[in-house]
Amino acid sequence: MAGAPTVSLPELRSLLAAGRARLFDVRSREEAAAGTIPGALNIPVSELESALQMEPAAFQARYSAQKPTLEEENLVFFCQMGRRGSQAAQLARKLGYTGARNYAGAYREWLEQQG
């Protein structure tokens, strides 16, 4: 099964420290409200396709964030365990977002490694 490119936790930390990645939490609003990776934008996977096809102004109004561009590098999608993040990154790539990647360790790994 050919999935979207992935990013490891050390690489993700490095990209975030350098301000070179945008994080998208594709879990439900309830899951994200209970805790997420700092700086992540919550767009549930169920609405991701429509969100990525919005006009930039509509995206900004809906999510209070700038819409990613097709050329943007390191658009990192994640969920709780890895499956939805992989689906989201594949969907984004299908829509032309060539920099879409999946953080395969997901929020579970992030939490485990924070201590």
Image (tube, rainbow, N blue to C red):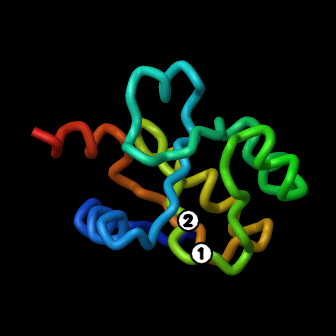
Position of residue 22 measured from the top left corner of the image (x, y, whole percent): 51, 61
For the point 34% across and 73% down, the residue is 18
Q: Earlier in the sequence, mark 1 or mark 2?
A: 2
Rendered position, 48 above or below 7: above
Q: Is residue 21 left or right of residue 114?
A: right
Q: Residues within 10 Å of mark 2 (few under 14, many from 20)?
A: many
Position of residue 78 measured from the top left corner of the image (x, y, whole percent): 48, 48
Residue receiving disc 2: 75
Q: Is 93 or 54 nearer to us in this picture?
A: 54
| Numbered circles on residues, count | 2
Residue receiving disc 1: 99
Name the quadrant of the N terminus. Answer: bottom right
Position of residue 49 measured from the top left corner of the image (x, y, whole percent): 79, 49
For the point 80% across and 41% down, the residue is 61
Q: Residues within 10 Å of mark 1 (few under 14, many from 20)?
A: many
Q: Identity of the amino acid at label 2?
A: Leu
Of helix, strand and loop, which one carries label 1? Answer: loop
For the point 80% across and 48% down, the residue is 59
Rendered position, 36 above or below 70: above
Distance of label 1 from label 2 (alpha carbons): 6 Å
Q: Pointers 1 and 2 in contact (CB under 8 A)? A: yes
Q: Is residue 17 left or right of residue 44?
A: left
Q: Is residue 86 left or right of residue 62?
A: left
Q: Identity of the amino acid at label 1?
A: Gly
Of helix, strand and loop, which one carries label 2? Answer: strand
